[in-house]
Amino acid sequence: MDSEQQEAVDVVSVPPPPQLRGRSREQEVLDRLLRDVQEGHSRVLVLRGELGVGKTALLTYLASRAPAGRVVRTAGVEIESEMPYSALQQLCAPLLGHLDQLPGAQRAALATAFGLSAGEPPGRLVVGLAVLGLLAEASADEPLVCLVDDVEWLDELSAAVLAFVARRLDAESVALLFAVSTSTAGPAQANDELLSGLPELRVEGLADEDARALLDSVLTGPVDPDVRDRIIAETGGNPLALLELPRGLSSAELVFGFAGAGNAEPANRLEEDFRQRIAALPDDSRRLLLTAAVEPVGDGGLLQRALERLGIGPEAASSAGIEGLVEIGAHVRFRHPLVRTAAWRSADAAAVREVHRALAEAIDPGREPDRHAWHRAQAVVATDEKTAEELTFAADRVLAKGGHAAVASLLELAAELSTDSSARAARLLSAAEAYLTAGVPARIPQLLDLAGISPLDQIQQAHAERLRAQAAFALTHSRAAAPRLLAAAQRLAEADPAAARETYLAAVGVALHGGRLTSEELHAAAAGARALPPASDASGLLLTGLSTWVLDGHTAAVPVLRRALRAVSQDDDLRLLWLAVPAAHVVWDDESWYQLSERAIMQARSTGALSLLPAALSFHAGALILAGRLADAAGLCDEIDVLARVTGLAPDTTAALILAAARGREAEARELIGLAVGDADTYGEGRLHGVADVATALLSNGLGDYRAAMHAARRAADRDDLAVGNWALAEAVEAATRAGEAAIAAEARDRLSERTGPVGSDWALGVQAVADALAGPPAEAEERYREAIERLSITRLGLLVARARLLYGEWLRRAGRRADGRVELRAAHEAFTAMGAEAFAERAGRELKATGETIRSRTADAHEELTPQESQVARLAVAGHTNAEIGAALFLSPRTVEWHLRKVFTKLGIASRRELATVLRAPDGPRR
């Protein structure tokens, strides 16, 4: 690290270690954490406790114990909580000397987010990777301690990115600590949820003995023992309350008692005490505190200019009583966030507007137009179209940072100030669109209700209906979105055919998720789409293909869907993935399924497209399951869960369902199946019933419960949902054959042939060959089994290859050809065991034992001892990716990738990447 970078990191002037009473347990935890970081590990800790309990003091204690110059800090500020990346910028600013060491895309994203350069709005995932890399680079030579205070008031994007980073720190020598107040409502709950599951330390009030000693240290005269005990009891041992409450009591009250606040929370008591102290100040001193509270950045120069415009002289800062509440210099610091809150909330609306007006006048609009516009807007009493226009322009500039939620807030405020009703409606619709993009659909209905008060033209009405439906679907995947989208598309049909096609496609997609429950809307949407002039782009072809599938059946849809998949594959915008991959199932195109979902993951990770990533992960996990890569699929399912917690969007559980069934873990699978059925009933997502039945059939076929598998597969086949019906028929043939229901098996086989025949892909013909071998003419069975294995072996579908060999081996054993059967069964058993398909492995093992073979306990090879994370890192390394590229793909820092590789080398007994390929095979690819 050069001297400039070293100087940049040395940003926190650390005082001597504070003398903390009654905190030996907490100090021991922090000391141990710091030792771990100094030994090369990363550690994350969340301090939780009520306001004033001493979280900030503990952070300061840790800072004092860290190496000099190796601490960076940030804190949330309520008035700044709508400014995107404001807290993150404060934390990272001292580390920007390392910016050039990041990959280009990450460097550009962080520079744009922090307003250092202009560019397209960066996705929060890319920003998260950039911050992860920045911390890794800054800690390359010495440990780094990052402290985040007042998490409850962090802006949304900063909170999301820091939570993302916290879950991925591993071997970077970074300590990341958060302090969260549990007694604060509002954004605290949302930000706190982002940190759920991270290691935490609860900070409670002091024990009575320590509380009494602390209280005595600030008492200046005699105090009645009962009064002392009452203060300790009512504060709950809260240190700040113990220090501050006596300031508001007279000598007589300390001796003879005081009128307490009953069971009021210490935070409420503290704020009330600060309010009383502020009320006792001279008028100018109160206005000074209010101005400092409303100005969120703590800019001493700006505060001074605003005070001059308010006619407040320097003597206001030196009046008796203001000391201990705020420190004013080049930077303005309040003793505690509650002082800021008390100053703000104790002022009347006119005084607050006056301060905002002074701040707006003190800010140069040419240098800081956004802050100028915001303060000016807060000073407006009623409406002001000019200020509304300034806010709209500010929203455009904020969008360049990727702060869609902040954009929505600015547009909401602009709408409130609008004098023109049509402009107000347009701004509200734009705000709703921004919230949808930001992944905050819960805010949309209220905005649309407000927009509806103004007269909307036909296109705006349709736009509002589309947004309302998309918000509902994003939150719950509810079928209620289908009729709304259909109505919106019908309104747009004449006025804007292109927008109508997009809305019809959304309506078709939502109705397909609804399954039988939305069959009426599905047919209406398909018919409405057919009435529009067709389009030849990817979206238009997909709409035509899916409409044909709904109205005319499978055979007629195949040619159009194939053309649509080619168009989607050649398109850089993969937002159509949620419908393209199901279309790939219809035409039995495993290669498009794999490639599209893999590309979509890469695109979503590189751009931070939260709307795309969950579906991409789910679809690719499904592809990996059929490839037999169950451990890799499990890693993607874990990532889906994390994304659902971070975004609050409806999680996609289909991959997790199928994975549990393929693994043969009965208890886990049945629990997930039950949850899926419950969600399907609650939200009307009928397609989940079909997925749950296919998962049941897959699980039951593995367990050998063929009658249960048959009933579940037939239910799914009768529903015939998109991308589910084909699989259900294949499971039904196997289950019915093994259950002795020849007629049912033959019917399912004939229905399956109607789906596979028009396609002719190796996947389709391989699955059909298995069905023919099971339920077709017995004389042709062996030939058809061999064909199935040959065709499926050409594809990526390793799980289906193993299942075909299992069925062939079972047939050979029953035909009395035990030696031949042993070969196929042994291959199937080894494949299932390596995949982790436990139930199918046991089924193959039972059959293998029946041939006379003894199955020995298998000693795991070294590479099977790798964790899923290590396996993913190793596979990407074998494929030739650099540490930085692997880190970008897996949301890890390059140093963590290096750490995982060292562990892989140790487990495999090798010393370099070159040796990896000899012990691990590269990622699956088509063997054509």
Image (tube, grey):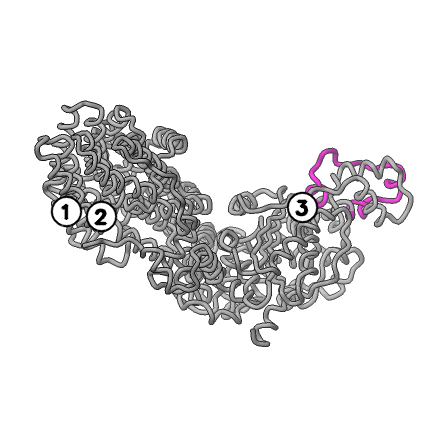
- In terms of image quadrants, where is residue 79? bottom right
Instruction: Pick whichever of labels 3 and 2 is earlier in the sequence.
Output: 3
Is residue 477 in sight in this rendering?
A: no
Residue under the image location 56 percent in, 45 percent down: 188
Q: Amino acid at mark 2?
A: Asp
Element assignment for label 1: loop
- Residue 29 included in the magenta stretch of the image: no
Which numbered marker is on residue 590? Answer: 2
732 displayed left or right of 118 = left
Which residue is label 3 attached to? 51
684 displayed left or right of 550 = right
Instruction: Pick whichever of labels 3 and 1 is earlier in the sequence.
Output: 3
Residue under the image location 21 percent in, 49 percent down: 795
Q: Is residue 118 above or below residue 690?
A: below
Decide: few, some or many residues near mark 3? Use Cα within 10 Å; few <14, some 14-19, many ≥20. Answer: many
- Residue 254 included in the magenta stretch of the image: yes
